Amino acid sequence: MKFPNPVPVVEIARKINAKLIGDASLLAYGINEIHKVEKGDITFSDVAKYFQKSIKSEASIIILNSEAECPPGKALLICDNPFEAYDSLVREHRPFRPLTASISELAEIHPTTIIEPNVVIGPDVKIGKNCHIQANTTIYEYTYIGDNVVIEPNCVIGANAFYYKRYPGKMERWRSGGCTILENDVHIGAGCTIAKGVSGDTIIGEGSKLDCLIQIGHGAVVGKNCLFAAQVGVGGKTVIEDDVVLYGQVGIAQSLHIGKGVVVLAKSGVSKNLEAGKTYFGYPAQEMNISYRELAALRQLPELLKKKG
């Protein structure tokens, strides 16, 4: 998530009541989780064993709950509750805005795009040329849709991330400050739900096609010309490269990397990274030939037990 204008680190320190260690001249250009940070970003850590990962990341400003050595060119902000500080900054720059009209005056929609009845479009949504948004679809704030995109009925694009901070006895939801991006020539089938990123972007790459009833989690990145069959679920922050095919009811866990040209056969469960250019099957998914040999061996097991007995 990028700020509209750079914010001085000294101003951020004042807002979150933090002690500043390091370069007080820095400007913050955005805020992001550790896995998506860039130079100029703010990130945070409230667990000591992850401090160094945060400090050594691309982030320029790191919010911590105890002091640490600060590298040159960076700043540490020390406060009691880094998560609350981080979340408050997201909420400041992405304040909650309830929908007050079917189509927000702050939305930009190209005149060649077709909007069917009962479509709801939030503020700061941009929709390109020759798109077709079908009935009863809701498109939430900070969604950017390219040209020639089709979204079939009853979809939700840009829903809040399913992401919570755990405390003893309760969970607190993060404010979703990221964007949702559908690139040119994407097709979204009926009843799909695509969550916005927590602070990064959820992206569906150019030319990709999603069947009906698919869930794409927060911050997931889907490459170009991918093909997903019905009831696929993709966990948050997973990266899927170009030309990947996921058959019906495939489930992919969060924070994985799926290589280019991978094919995952129906009803498979993916729990680890998959190497490019291979076909996978099973639960947990593994290379198809290995899974098929294991299934063939299992079919022979009753006969083998009889012979042994």
Image (spheres, rainbow, N blue to C red):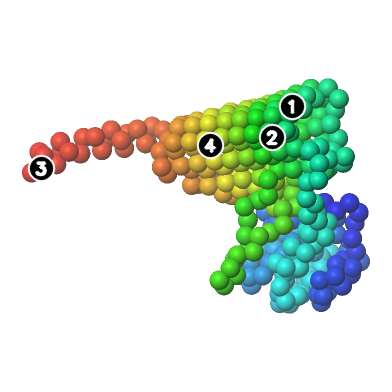
Pointer 2 residue: 137
Q: Residue at x 55, y 71 (%)?
A: 169
| Nearer to me, 267 or 287 | 267
The answer to whether the residue labelled 1 contacts the one labelled 2, judged by CB atoms less than 8 Å apart, is: yes
Pointer 3 residue: 308
Secondary structure, mark 3, is: helix
Marks 3 and 4, how far apart at CA: 42 Å
Q: Circle 3: is it few (<14), some (14-19), or many (20+) Cα within 10 Å?
A: few
Secondary structure, mark 4, is: loop
Report the disc number at residue 275: none
The answer to whether the residue labelled 2 contacts the one labelled 4, judged by CB atoms less than 8 Å apart, is: no
Residue type for callout 3: Lys
Counting residues from the start of the chain, the first of labels 2 and 3 encountered is 2
Residue 132 falls in which quadrant of the image?
top right
Counting residues from the start of the chain, the first of labels 4 and 1 encountered is 1
Marks 2 and 4, how far apart at CA: 19 Å
Secondary structure, mark 2, is: loop
